Image: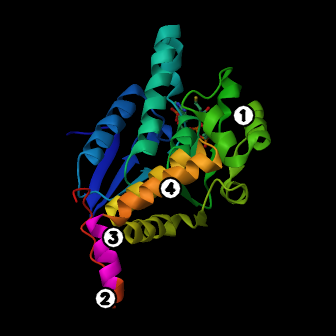
Amino acid sequence: MVYDNIIFKVEKGVATITFNRPEVLNALNEASLQEFSNALDAVASDEDIRVLVLTGAGEKSFVAGADITEFLRFNVLKAKLFSETGHTLVHRLQELSIPVIAAVNGFALGGGCEIVLGCDFIYASENAMFGLPEINLGIIPGFGGTQRLPRLVGKNMAKEMIFTGKMISAAEAHTVGLVNTVCSQDQLMSEVMKTAAAMASKGKASLRAAKQAINSGMDVDLKTGCRIEIDAFAICLSSSDAKEGTEAFLEKRKANFKGTLQE
Ligand code: COA
């Protein structure tokens, strides 16, 4: 597959998708969204990939939102299709069976911010800025921002950000629980890769079960969420990875998980 707007690479079980239009701060045009979708197909179909990392090219921006130059030729139907495409992509990140880390190396605005909201967690460089500035264009977020931001940072903080379009710094994003770790631009990718490698060494079936239990549990009441966990736990415990993990502990050696979903 040839990519012009993203860079897709896989190394030691970790796939990295880099949004690559630095001249426009990696703004997402339709071609980038299509290529992102194709790369997600490749990730989903490769059993050897255990973690996905998303980042942006250059030192200034992760993704500065949808490509505004394409908006003027959108009619209502085209706008709906564009928004649905974005929703589908962010949803796919959530539904991927492997962990997805956003390595936010600069602006994560509009659609860029909404993409990181669909990731499992976020590491950011000190210069990163987060925001949903659509209100400044006379529109609203269209890739799930009005739904996921309040769920993550609380309703009132999300309303202020969406109603004013203001950006928040990496430090503030860390304070409100949007970002797990803030590091220097120089160290961002090495810190992300360290965490990715740590997760890649775990059993794929248990990572998938943990992700699904947390994500499904967040949308239901506690009692239902706990039932989801009980079922996921029982399935995990009967997997070959669980056998390997417990045997390795008892034999005082490092577990060698197969990293496969086939039991
Ligand atoms: N769509 C299309 N082009 C974009 C873009 C976007 N979302 N964001 C930035 N660009 C382009 C700029 O037009 C500029 O192109 P030019 O060099 O041909 O003029 C280039 O990227 C660099 O951006 P610039 O505005 O000069 O950088 P800056 O450091 O002064 O400002 C931002 C950075 C992110 C504050 C500013 O670019 C911005 O507000 N972008 C739009 C963000 C937005 O509204 N996103 C949501 C879209 S729905």
Q: CA distance from mark 3 to mark 2?
A: 14 Å
Whether 180 is drawn above or below 251: the answer is: above
Residue topped by disc 1: 162
Which quarter of the picture shows residue 34? top left
Magenta residues span 239-248
Residue topped by disc 3: 242
Task: Please say if the residues under marks 3 and 2 sit with CB atoms less than 8 Å apart.
Answer: no
Q: Quadrant of the C terminus?
A: bottom left
Kindly identify which numbered label has been placed on residue 81. Answer: none
Label 2 Cα crowd, 10 Å radius (few <14 / some 14-19 / many 20+): few
Label 4 beta carbon less than 8 Å to ligand 1 = no
Question: Considering the numbered disc 1 on the image, is that residue within a helix, a strand or a loop?
Answer: helix
Which quarter of the picture shows residue 179? bottom right
Question: Considering the numbered disc 4 on the image, is that residue within a helix, a strand or a loop?
Answer: helix
Whether 31 is drawn above or below 25: the answer is: above
Task: Please say if the residues under marks 1 and 3 sit with CB atoms less than 8 Å apart.
Answer: no
Q: As drawn, is 49 to the left or to the right of 70?
A: left
Q: Viewer-nearest of labels 1 and 4?
A: 4
Q: Write down which quadrant ligand 1 falls in.
A: top right
Q: Residue at x 38, y 46 (%)?
A: 96
Residue topped by disc 4: 229
Q: CA distance from mark 1 to mark 4?
A: 34 Å
